[in-house]
Amino acid sequence: MQIKGIKEQQISQKRVYEFLELFDIMYDEFTEAEKKEFFNSFIKRIDIHPQPLENGQILKSIQFRFPVYYQGSEVDTFFPNKENTVECVVLMER
């Protein structure tokens, strides 16, 4: 069961593109649970600061389940710079 769970969490590049192509069409139709599941398929972990920094930033990092291109490099974890970031905080409840 553990192996099956690991395989189900792995998504291919093709699957990512399929998700993105349908995103703008389907997102508004998703239930809250489906929205959460959708984002969980892309995002492995989000770290936030316990208290906002002096500039108001609360996001430490976002770790993705696949590599993304950021500032000319392929990374799987995004660390926002300390200046000029736009952040969105989402409350997810069960």
Image (cartoon, rainbow, N blue to C red):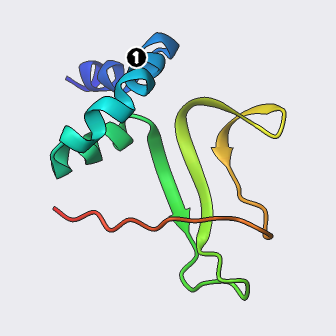
Disc 1 designates what residue? 18
Q: Residues within 10 Å of mark 1 (few under 14, many from 20)?
A: few
Q: Residue placed at 77% from the left, 68% from the top?
A: 84
> Residue 28 appears in which quarter of the rendering?
top left
Q: Residue placed at 42% from the left, 21% from the top?
A: 21
Q: Residue placed at 65% from the left, 83% from the top?
A: 56
Most distant residue in the front direction? 25
Q: Considering depth in this image, is 20 or 45 the residue closer to the camera?
A: 20
Horizontal arrangement in the rendering, residue 39 relative to residue 59 (left or right): left
Residue 68 against residue 13 in the figure, above or below: below
Q: Considering depth in this image, is 63 or 86 the residue closer to the camera?
A: 86
Where residue 60 appears, x then y in whole percent? Answer: 63, 65
Most distant residue in the right direction? 72
Q: Residue placed at 15% from the left, 46% from the top?
A: 31
Where residue 47 appears, x then y in whole percent? Answer: 54, 62
Where residue 5 appears, x then y in whole percent? Answer: 27, 26
Quarter of the image that includes the C terminus: bottom left
Where residue 72 appears, x then y in whole percent? Answer: 84, 33
Total marks placed: 1
Residue 11 appears in the rendering: no
Residue 6 appears in the rendering: yes
Quarter of the image that includes the N terminus: top left
Horizontal arrangement in the rendering, residue 6 relative to residue 82 (left or right): left
Q: Amino acid at mark 1?
A: Glu
> Residue 61 appears in which quarter of the rendering?
bottom right
Q: Secondary structure at mark 1?
A: helix
